Amino acid sequence: MTKPSRPSQQTRLLHDQATPMAPVKTVNPAVQRGSTILMSDSDALYDHGHITYGRAGLPIHQTLCDALSDLEGGLGTRLFPSGLAAITGSLLAVLNAGDGVLLPDCAYAPTRRFGDTVLKRMGIEVVYFPPRASAEAIMALATPRTRAIFLESPGSLTFELQDVPAIAALARTRGIITLMDNTWGASLIFKPLAHGVDISIQALTKYVGGHSDVFMGSACASDPDLLQKLDDQVWQMGWATSPDDAYLMLRGLRTLNVRMNQHAASTLDIASWLNARPEVSEVLCPALPGARGYEIWKRDYTGLCGLFSFTLKPGPRRAVEGFINALDLFGLGFSWGGYESLAIPCDPQLTRTAADPDLKGPLIRLHIGLEDASDLKADLDQALKVYGQMAGLA
Ligand SMILES: Cc1ncc(COP(=O)(O)O)c(C=O)c1O
């Protein structure tokens, strides 16, 4: 047989692969990028017992999923390209056309939007429940169509705590699936599965990522049927996450605990300081003794994060803008969970239809970052003085 001639330069440029070095043991896992996965032979192409296409996830994704399952105390974790995709994907995984779902009135605004648009379009009955209602009162809103109850505790912007274990236990007796957006708890200071929730969801974009530079979401469960439904959803919808982003999330996990401890210490300090300010009417931080939700927080949570709200004593919108614009160290921006402090006025995006959140003035949400807490208090102090003057409180 004649030896094939040496391929041309063009072909060699495409096919030459230097003999790979045996992997060395680095501190962090190696990141492989790839859409196509090359198979050993023809049979392997259609052998679904192993990964045949990169969209199903590469080793770095599996490493991240294993670490998240460990954190969550669950059997398996599925990844989504954003926190919102994890919420919508998990709901779609368990709901069928014609089913019903209960959503908390304090749900993250895009979760509400999804309920009011896509779910309604699918003929799904969406009922909002007052977030502070008892498990029995919430269950009384369930209809024969109700297939799932979605929880988000504490609630977005207004920080109501739900009695998660009681709701989950009651739902289970009725064969209703519970899902929880646990981004605030990051599954470090609150573990939904241990409290009876079926699917624990988080926007990894926040505390797991921790640096405000990457999107991803996760859903974790222990029931193999639910995991299969989540798998089918991810695969059928074609959602994929980048290996580099998975690497960043894995790196974020390494420091999650120490960052959370620092966020928590500064948050408690600043929340109690704000509580004593003459310009402030109420601090909505469930970890603050005496605050609404404190008893549930004390019972169910082992810590807190950097996100809470407070209301200013009533004043004109101009004065609220004056307060926000006077802030220097606090960035003005959405999202949270990064190392930096942020502030937003909440009133323009507050939608509530099931219960009056009973706010005692304009609502401000803060994210307390890893800066020195005394610098943050000094910044708040000068901005609150601006508010006091503009609102005529002095
Ligand atoms: C409570 C909550 N859940 C989910 C999300 C969505 O996360 P992502 O921005 O990754 O879609 C957010 C984002 O702000 C959030 O605040």
Image (cartoon, rainbow, N blue to C red):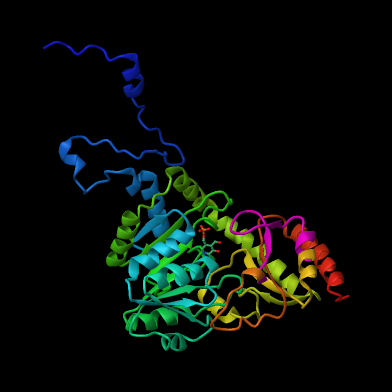
Residue 13, image x, y percentages: 36, 20
Q: Quadrant of residue 386?
A: bottom right
Asked if residue 325 lies in the magenta stretch, the reply is yes
Residue 186, image x, y percentages: 51, 62
In the foreground, 60 or 228: 228
Residue 71 seen in render: no
**The N terminus lies in quadrant:** top left
Residue at 65% in and 83% down: 358
Residue 133, image x, y percentages: 51, 85
Asked if residue 36 lies in the magenta stretch, the reply is no
Please give left or right for residue 346 compared with residue 303 in the image: right
Write down the region rendered in magenta: 323-347
Q: How many marks?
A: 0
Please give left or right for residue 195 compared with residue 332 in the image: left
Residue at 65% in and 78% down: 289
Q: Quadrant of residue 76?
A: bottom left
Residue 345 seen in render: yes
> What is the residue that sits farthest to the left in this orientation?
1
Residue 2, image x, y percentages: 14, 10
> What is the residue that sits farthest to the front in this orientation?
121
Residue at 35% in and 40% down: 35
Residue at 19% in and 45% down: 47
In the foreground, 119 or 155: 119
Please give left or right for residue 345 compared with residue 206 in the image: right
Please give left or right for residue 21 compared with residue 104 in the image: left
**The C terminus lies in quadrant:** bottom right
Q: Quadrant of residue 368?
A: bottom right
